[in-house]
């Protein structure tokens, strides 16, 4: 068995997924979408505590019941 790694622009991922889905069932055993956007992951880690402080406060509790 072999593994192929593809790097695809976000705008073209739907095209590639469509091709994969339309291949014969026994051609591909498994596929996985991996987002390696390091910048976004770092931003999320740094921002998490700040966002929680903004979103999880008493002012917003009125809106939380609709979630």
Image (cartoon, rainbow, N blue to C red):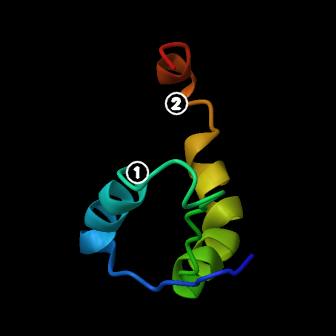
**Residue 40 vs residue 65, the one in the foreground:** 40
Mark 2 Cα within 10 Å, few/some/many (few <14, many 20+)?
few
Give the mark nearer the N terminus: 1 vs 2.
Answer: 1
Quarter in which the N terminus is drawn:
bottom right
Q: Hey, which residue is sitting farthest top in the picture?
A: 65
**Residue 37 vs residue 7, the one in the foreground:** 7
**Residue 11 vs residue 15, the one in the foreground:** 15
- Are discs 1 and 2 less than 8 Å apart at CB? no
Asked whether, in this view, residue 30 is left or right of residue 66, the answer is right
For residue 53, above or below residue 37: above
Q: Residue at x 26, y 64 (%)?
A: 15
Numbered circle sitting on residue 21: 1
Please identify, in this view, whether the residue under mark 1 or under mark 2 is nearer the observer: 1
For residue 6, above or below residue 24: below
Q: Say which quarter of the image contains residue 17.
A: bottom left
Q: Residue at x 58, y 53 (%)?
A: 26
Numbered circle sitting on residue 45: none
**Residue 13 vs residue 4, the one in the foreground:** 4
Residue 57 position, x and y percent, is 62, 37
Asked whether, in this view, residue 9 is left or right of residue 28, the answer is left
Residue 12 position, x and y percent, is 26, 72
Question: Helix or strand or loop: what does disc 1 sit on?
Answer: helix
Q: How many marks?
A: 2
Residue 27 position, x and y percent, is 54, 60
Q: Residue at x 67, y 62 (%)?
A: 48
Q: Residue at x 52, y 30 (%)?
A: 60
Q: Say which quarter of the image contains residue 31.
A: bottom right
Question: Helix or strand or loop: what does disc 2 sit on?
Answer: loop
Q: CA distance from mark 1 to mark 2?
A: 42 Å
Residue 52 position, x and y percent, is 65, 50
Numbered circle sitting on residue 60: 2
Mark 1 Cα within 10 Å, few/some/many (few <14, many 20+)?
few
């Amino acid at each position: 068995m072999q593994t192929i790694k593809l790097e695809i622009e976000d705008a073209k991922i739907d095209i590639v997924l469509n091709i994969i889905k339309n291949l014969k069932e026994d051609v591909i055993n498994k596929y996985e979408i991996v987002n390696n956007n390091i910048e976004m992951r770092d931003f999320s880690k740094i921002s998490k505590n700040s966002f929680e402080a903004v979103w999880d406060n008493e002012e917003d509790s009125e809106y939380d019941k609709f979630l």
